[in-house]
Image (cartoon, rainbow, N blue to C red):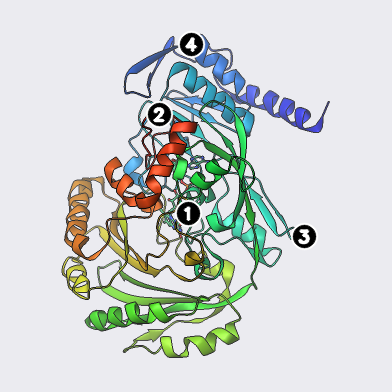
């Protein structure tokens, strides 16, 4: 018996041992699911039981123990969503079986990688959730300078696995975010100005398309698909493996924030917009507003220098003294530490309403509008951060990948979070009104991984010049819109 078959057989035996309804005893006579077109599909017990047997791990129903803990996402706004079935996959074969089962019954599917999507489209009511979170193998090879990750890998695992060799794959911040959705949407982070987006360092993917076939997409195979998955989100299939290029990165970087009083907001932001245009590509420069637990607001300029800390000290000299800082918290620290600094402020299960828009120009009236609506409301925590694109992000041609924001100067992300569900309606209204007021000062484009509740038309506008090609490729690989719970590229066939 081959090793892989042995592992599968053993995994299968273990899975059977702990699938509580193996033998179909605990499956109801009928299970209702939502179809791809919004109708109700009724699955028979025997059909569900056969599907459960085809998976090496677990199929969960609403009545299965642990169902509720296995369906949750990062954004608590999704807490009330109840999928009909959760197929926990451990490899491409499981994913193929789940896709084929869904297609043969015309079920609406959702796909979960790390579960961090802001809009919570990875879980919907009465669907088949294809859950990849248990596929979390990562390997990093310093000789070839490549890393291979499965879709359940989180950023902290990617960072630790690559830094063990003094290397890095440029990706995001907040270490409990999944690499999977992050990569498919583009992947922005503190390394991007020096090393490019995550997709600019993606060498190939293994992907199960809507017809149930496992394909490789790279610069030499299925090149159209490879173009589309680099920014087009989860529209084209289920990625079961990502191969990345690694870059060298020493473990210590110079990073931190300079804190300002709110009275200095306009001055500070004016300087930020000017200086961030001039910053060298080693320097990641952000501006942020936040508030203490009691609602006291404060401003920060954030800096991460992706080179030697000694060199960074020289470069940062002029930036860290901009305006009238009240505290300077910049110091050398480990890259791994830097990557976790925002974790605690972004806990799982809290309710979040956050949107983003790119910016091509700066009008200082934006700051007045932003400050005017930055009012404290008990129980809500406001957040805002501005980052500069540019550098290596713009080394790639606007039509070389599906990511549509090459050349955009900044990205603004703003919103609020709260725990008490009684505040949900009020806080969502606050967030929507806020963005209506900001609209004249930002573009009508957004990074797809910052999508909240935007419409399909807004998604189409946001992809701009790359949208027609995305539709063509969607028509070829997913003409029936099997993968539609995402920032959807609508097929036209
Ligand atoms: C606190 C926080 C910090 C963040 N920081 C950053 C950052 O620094 N940089 C950045 O670029 N983004 C950042 N993001 C956005 C992040 O990229 C997205 O939330 C991304 O969707 C997370 O991926 P995931 O696999 O965890 O999410 P999931 O919720 O599991 O997936 C999101 C969507 O991606 C699709 N998808 C996921 N996996 C697959 C797959 N294998 N095959 C096909 N489709 C799939 C599905 O459509 C799914 O609905 C942040 C988000 C949060 C909430």
- According to the picture, the residue beneath numbered tag 3 turns out to be 143
- Mark 2–mark 1 Cα distance, whole angstroms, equals 27 Å
Q: Is residue 104 visible?
A: yes
Q: Is mark 1 within 8 Å of ligand 1?
A: yes
Determine crowd level at label 1: few under 14, some 14-19, many 20+ residues with C-alpha closer than 10 A: many
User: Of circles 4 and 3, which is in front?
Assistant: 3
Q: Which mark is residue 83?
A: 2
Position above or below: 377 against 44: below
State if disc 4 and disc 1 touch (CB < 8 Å): no
Mark before the other along the chain sequence, 1 or 4 = 4
Position of residue 407 in the picture relative to residue 268 (left or right)? right
Where residue 45 appears, as percent x and y from the top left, is 48, 11
Mark before the other along the chain sequence, 4 or 3 = 4
Q: Secondary structure at mark 4?
A: helix
Determine crowd level at label 3: few under 14, some 14-19, many 20+ residues with C-alpha closer than 10 A: few
- Mark 4–mark 3 Cα distance, whole angstroms, equals 51 Å
Mark before the other along the chain sequence, 2 or 1 = 2
User: Of circles 2 and 1, which is in front?
Assistant: 1
Mark before the other along the chain sequence, 1 or 3 = 3
Q: Residue at x 32, y 44 (%)?
A: 77
Q: Which mark is residue 186?
A: 1
Quadrant location of residue 223?
top right
């Amino acid at each position: 018996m081959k090793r892989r078959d042995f592992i599968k057989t053993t995994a299968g035996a273990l899975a059977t041992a702990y699938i509580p309804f193996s033998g179909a005893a605990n499956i109801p006579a009928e299970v209702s699911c939502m179809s791809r077109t919004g109708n109700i599909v009724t699955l028979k017990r025997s059909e569900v039981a056969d599907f459960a047997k085809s998976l090496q791990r677990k199929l969960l129903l609403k009545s299965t123990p642990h169902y509720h803990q296995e369906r949750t996402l990062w954004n608590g706004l999704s807490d009330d969503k109840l999928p009909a079935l959760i197929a926990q996959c451990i490899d491409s074969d499981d994913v193929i079986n789940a896709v084929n089962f869904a297609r043969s019954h015309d079920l609406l599917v959702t796909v979960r990688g790390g579960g961090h999507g802001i809009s919570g489209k990875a879980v919907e009511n009465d669907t088949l959730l294809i859950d990849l979170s248990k596929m979390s193998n990562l390997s990093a090879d310093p000789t070839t300078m490549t890393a291979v990750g499965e879709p359940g890998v989180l950023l902290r695992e990617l960072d630790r696995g690559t830094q063990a060799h003094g290397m890095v794959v440029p990706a995001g911040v907040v270490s409990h975010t999944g690499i999977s959705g992050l990569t498919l949407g583009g992947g922005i982070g503190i390394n991007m100005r020096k090393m490019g987006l995550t997709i600019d360092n993606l060498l190939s993917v293994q992907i199960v398309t809507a017809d149930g076939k496992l394909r490789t997409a790279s610069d030499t195979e299925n090149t159209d698909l490879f173009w589309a998955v680099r920014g087009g989100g989860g529209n084209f299939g289920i990625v079961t493996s990502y191969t990345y290029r690694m870059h060298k990165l020493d473990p210590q970087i110079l990073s931190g924030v300079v804190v300002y009083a709110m009275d200095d907001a306009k001055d500070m932001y004016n300087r930020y917009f000017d200086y961030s245009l001039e910053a060298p590509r080693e320097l990641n420069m952000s501006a942020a507003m936040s508030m203490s637990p009691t609602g006291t607001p404060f401003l920060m300029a954030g800096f991460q220098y992706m080179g030697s800390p000694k060199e960074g000290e020289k470069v940062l000299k002029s930036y860290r003294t901009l305006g009238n800082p009240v505290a300077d918290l910049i110091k050398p620290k480990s890259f791994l530490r830097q990557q976790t600094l925002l974790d605690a402020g972004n806990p799982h299960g809290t309710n979040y309403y956050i949107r983003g828009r790119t910016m091509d120009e700066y009008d200082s009236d934006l700051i007045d509008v932003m400050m005017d609506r930055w009012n404290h409301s008990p129980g809500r925590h406001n957040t805002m951060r501005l980052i500069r694109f540019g550098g290596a992000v713009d080394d790639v041609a606007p039509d070389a990948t599906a990511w549509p924001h090459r050349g955009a100067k900044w990205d603004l992300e703003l919103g609020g979070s709260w725990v008490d569900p009684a505040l949900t309606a009020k806080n969502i209204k606050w967030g929507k009104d806020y963005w209506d007021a900001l609209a004249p000062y930002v573009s009508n484009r957004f990074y797809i991984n910052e999508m909240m509740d935007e419409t399909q038309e807004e998604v189409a506008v946001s992809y701009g010049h790359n949208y027609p090609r995305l539709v063509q490729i969607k028509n070829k690989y997913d003409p029936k819109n099997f993968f539609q719970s995402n920032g959807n590229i609508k097929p036209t066939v």
